[in-house]
Amino acid sequence: MNSRLFQDTSLDLMKDASEVIRYDLPGIPLYLRLRQLKDYPNMKAMGHWHEDLELVRIEKGQMYYQINGQRILLKEKDCLFVNSRQMHFGSSYLRQDCRFLCLIFHPSFFPENAALRRLFIQPYLSKKAPEYLIFSPGDSFYETISCFLLEAAQLKSENSPGFPLEIAGLVQLFFARLIRLPQMQEAGSPGQNSPDLAALKDMVSFIAQNYPEKITLEEIARAGKVSRSKCCSLFNRYLQLSPVVYLNQYRLKVSCRMLTCTSESITNITAACGFSHPSYYGKLFLKYYGVSPNAYRKQAAASLV
């Protein structure tokens, strides 16, 4: 197994199921890494959202990206801007790997001046702003976003003193140019404001808060104030998973964190993550990660040496 797989456990979820980004440097809300889909179980990330803004550049290959139920195909060299608080995830195209550059930064990375934030930041992060924008080679803004991402990645790789400050300057310059685009002046699609998406977030939040307990489909549906059939429909529409599969994948993700960051026994991890029996947990873990929990723990430890 590729040791980079263990980096996937560095992304946790808040109690409302919004993602907690484990930034590259403490106190600096910036995440910038080159990733590969093969590092994710089944080459698919879990559906999630966060306050942060996200930028993606496809370095090699192609991948699907789903945002608020809309699936798009990103091709090699394409760049994607995902606005704050959108439900999104990436997955493989025809089971093929994809290498991509991912830059995530929190709105707090912008100027603290209240007037600047009120006039030039908040309006473009609101529910009325576009959910996402795609830029392909040949588009008028493509060179701006592509060069920004590549320059930021180069600064990080050089690791010179003060490089986060340089990237912060690039981020602000990039965003200033982004908001000039006509697309940024247009209202976002109805998807991000829909009652269906709000219900899904409530149900995912319920799972995030109660995963250690026995959870039924009825309880998940009740959290979103919808019927069982509607619950299943929403999970399939937005996350391409059933509620039960999402619940199990969430539990497995938490267990990965425990395997790599604690010395708890497999039995204790099984119970803490809401699985009924270690044998079932082990079988499910093997299905998604390709190794047993014990082997995963050993390989994670070896990757840190």
Image (cartoon, rainbow, N blue to C red):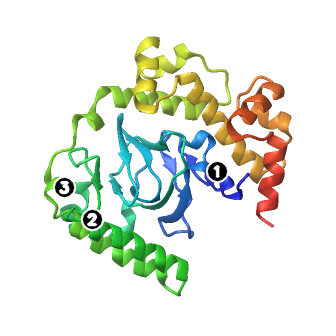
Q: Secondary structure at mark 3?
A: helix
Residue drawn where x is 80% and y is 54% of the image: 299
Vertical order, 248 against 138 (above or below): above
Could you tell me how far apart the alpha carbons at marks 2 and 3 are, in whole angstroms?
15 Å
Image quadrant where residue 256 sits: top right
* Nearest to the observer: residue 57 or residue 131: 57
Residue 142, disc: 2
Location of residue 29 in the rendering, given as x and y in whole percent from the top left corner = 47, 65
Q: Is residue 245 left or right of residue 94?
A: right
Location of residue 192 in the rendering, given as x and y in whole percent from the top left corner = 29, 37
| Residue type marked 3 | Met
Q: Is residue 211 visible?
A: yes
Residue drawn where x is 60% and y is 46% of the image: 40
Alpha-carbon neighbours of circle 1 within 10 Å: few (<14), some, or many (≥20)? some
Could you tell me how far apart the alpha carbons at marks 1 and 2 are, in whole angstroms?
32 Å
Instruction: Kindly report which numbered mark, 2 or 3, lies closer to the viewer in this rendering.
Output: 2
Residue 184, disc: 3
Residue 34, disc: none
Alpha-carbon neighbours of circle 2 within 10 Å: few (<14), some, or many (≥20)? some
Alpha-carbon neighbours of circle 3 within 10 Å: few (<14), some, or many (≥20)? some
Q: Secondary structure at mark 1?
A: helix
Q: Secondary structure at mark 2?
A: helix
Could you tell me how far apart the alpha carbons at marks 1 and 3 are, in whole angstroms?
33 Å
| Residue type marked 2 | Tyr
Vertical order, 74 against 231 (above or below): below
Q: Which residue does the numbered mark 1 point to in the structure image? A: 9
Q: Is residue 114 visible?
A: no
Location of residue 266 in the rendering, given as x and y in whole percent from the top left corner = 84, 38
Q: Earlier in the sequence, mark 2 or mark 3?
A: 2
